[in-house]
Image (cartoon, rainbow, N blue to C red):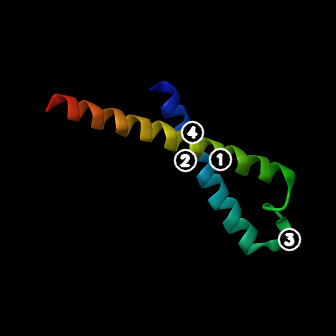
Amino acid sequence: MRFKNIVAHISIILSFVYIILFVFDHVNRAMFFIDNDITKVGLVVLCACSVVNAILVIKQLRAKARQAQNDK
């Protein structure tokens, strides 16, 4: 449960960072936030956190569905 919370919070934080960088990049194209290597690494981390978060949520939903089915 603790790992799931950490991954979810990291995903939210990185998502907001990318939204802010996208807005800044759109307003001032000379900044090149989306064109550097650090940003690309951050995007990979965000995607990995999102995938892990999705897998954990799916596992939790399946476990709840199995539990509800067994309770009947």
Residue 46 — which label?
Answer: 1
**Do residues under tags 4 and 3 come within 8 Å of each other at their CB atoms?**
no
Q: Earlier in the sequence, mark 4 or mark 1?
A: 1
Q: Label 1 crowding class (10 Å Cα cut-off): few <14, some 14-19, many 20+?
A: many
- Residue at x 36%, y 37% (from the top left corner): 62
Residue 30 — which label?
Answer: 3
Q: Earlier in the sequence, mark 2 or mark 1?
A: 2
Per the image, label 1 sits on a secondary structure element best described as helix
Q: Label 4 crowding class (10 Å Cα cut-off): few <14, some 14-19, many 20+?
A: some
Q: Earlier in the sequence, mark 4 or mark 3?
A: 3
How far apart are the two marked residues, 4 and 1, measured between alpha carbons?
Answer: 10 Å
How far apart are the two marked residues, 2 and 1, measured between alpha carbons?
Answer: 9 Å
User: What type is the residue that disc 2 sits on?
Assistant: Ile
- Residue at x 48%, y 25% (from the top left corner): 2
Q: Nearer the viewer, mark 4 or mark 2?
A: 4
40 displayed left or right of 2: right
Q: Nearer the viewer, mark 4 or mark 1?
A: 4
Pick the residue in front: 21 or 72: 72
Look at mark 2 in the image and give the residue it sits on. Answer: 12
User: What type is the residue that disc 4 sits on?
Assistant: Val
Q: Earlier in the sequence, mark 4 or mark 2?
A: 2
Per the image, label 2 sits on a secondary structure element best described as helix
Look at mark 4 in the image and give the residue it sits on. Answer: 52
Per the image, label 4 sits on a secondary structure element best described as helix
**Do residues under tags 2 and 3 come within 8 Å of each other at their CB atoms?**
no
- Residue at x 60%, y 52% (from the top left corner): 15
